[in-house]
Amino acid sequence: MKVIDGGVTAAKGFQAACCEANIKYKNRTDMAMVYSSQPCECAGTFTTNVVKAACVQWDQKIVYSGEPMQAVVINSGIANACTGKEGFDACEATAKAVEKELGVPFSNVAVASTGVIGMQLPVEKLVNGVTAMSKTLDESLEAGTAAAKAIMTTDTIHKEVAVTFEIAGKTVTLGGMSKGSGMIHPNMCTMLGFLTTDLAIEKCLLQEALSDVVKDTFNMITVDGDTSTNDTLLIMANGLAENAKIIEKGIEYETFVSALSFVCEYLAKKMAGDGEGASKLFEAKVVNAKSKDDARTLSRAIVASNLSKAAIYGCDANFGRFLCAMGYSGAQFDQNDVELFFESKEGRLQVFDKGTPIVFDEALAAKILGAEEVTIFVDMHEGSEEATAWGCDLTYDYVKINADYRS
């Protein structure tokens, strides 16, 4: 596998566009479109929040029906959640505008929204945006980057990545973009994400691969404990790499899964590190746990704790907060088996040894915790399973951003 420049337009046959539709924001792009020249096999994962946005339900219908997908239209600023029939009408109007402009059946057009909950989308602006973008679709890497920027809300950086890998002598490309900064908590994947590939693969295997990879990537991030109403991760595969279609598991399927895992983990970590108001990427790695579920539960509890996040922000070597979070996580373990370390580019320091605190250098601990990426490493000494979760520190700016988000 090779990491290359680009995002959603890196794979063959994919184009992107964006425009300034003035949905909510002014003087910036706020709509994007990703389009494939060929109908695609598609798969998706969605929020487990009972309150689902209209666009989530629209996309679920496409993915679960077995229909192909050929385009996705995304807007930022308004989430189209808690919007009743009018919200569904907005989805349909957007998809039908694509059908009119590009000839793609509206039932093959996904839609996604991010922003304020409870506001109605301005349908005329959506339709006008589709018309404008249909005329400017472009396969360039720059078009993909522009699309990634257009879907941002409180994000401070755009998030995209692309890789190539070999399948039976054919070069396959996989690219993606995502957005997410607040309302981030693992319960599917709290964000919007769009993946494109020219791989030829059966739909059922594409869905299985995506659902499995999500468990240890997007489902292992948290910023604020809020699971959004709009979580959507979609992948489109158009087959233009011309590899022999993957119809069963084997080395070719595993090669794809490995590339998919890399792309999803890369985007997930970018989102965690760009949490609202964040100054650091906060990672928890748990090894030698009794089960995979325990490892996931423990690592997620550490990065989700507000007290842990505050300690990371303050460079406070208060390791008791991490142990406390592990203790109420629901996983059962013996604290007398646990070792805990601080890690970053500034060094590695053990602070807890099998039930007993260790006298450590406070200055070194503060230096380690002051790095831009900080890891809490925990060895459970109770098994062989491991998992890693990602989050960010909790700063004053998180409250400032969310105190006036609607206005």
Image (cartoon, helix red, strand yellow):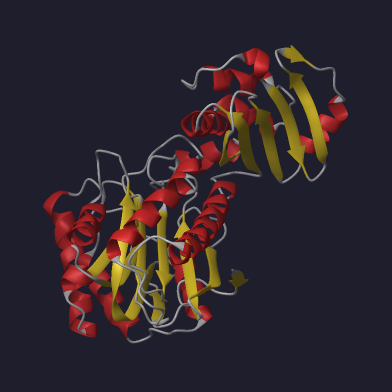
Q: Provide residue 255's location: percent of width, then percent of height.
A: 50, 64
Quadrant in which the N terminus is drawn: bottom right
Compared across the picture, whether 37 is left or right of 364 comes to left
Query: Which residue sits at x=77%, y=23%?
Result: 351
Q: Provide residue 356's location: percent of width, then percent of height.
A: 75, 12
Q: Provide residue 203's location: percent of width, then percent of height.
A: 29, 64
Q: Provide residue 270's location: percent of width, then percent of height.
A: 57, 54
Res. 78 in view: no
Q: How many marks?
A: 0
Answer with the quarter of the image where residue 239 lies: bottom left
Q: Is residue 358 above or below residue 297?
A: above
Res. 248 in view: yes
Compared across the picture, whether 35 is left or right of 142 comes to left
Q: Residue furthest left?
A: 85
Answer with the quarter of the image where residue 238 lies: bottom left
Query: Which residue sits at x=63%, y=40%?
Result: 282
Q: Is residue 179 above or below residue 215?
A: below
* Camera-side residue of 109 and 218: 218
Query: Which residue sits at x=18%, y=57%?
Result: 61
* Camera-side residue of 164 and 317: 164
Q: Is residue 403 above or below residue 322?
A: below
* Camera-side residue of 314 and 4: 4
* Camera-side residue of 16 and 385: 385
Answer with the quarter of the image where residue 106 lies: bottom left
Q: Residue furthest bottom?
A: 135
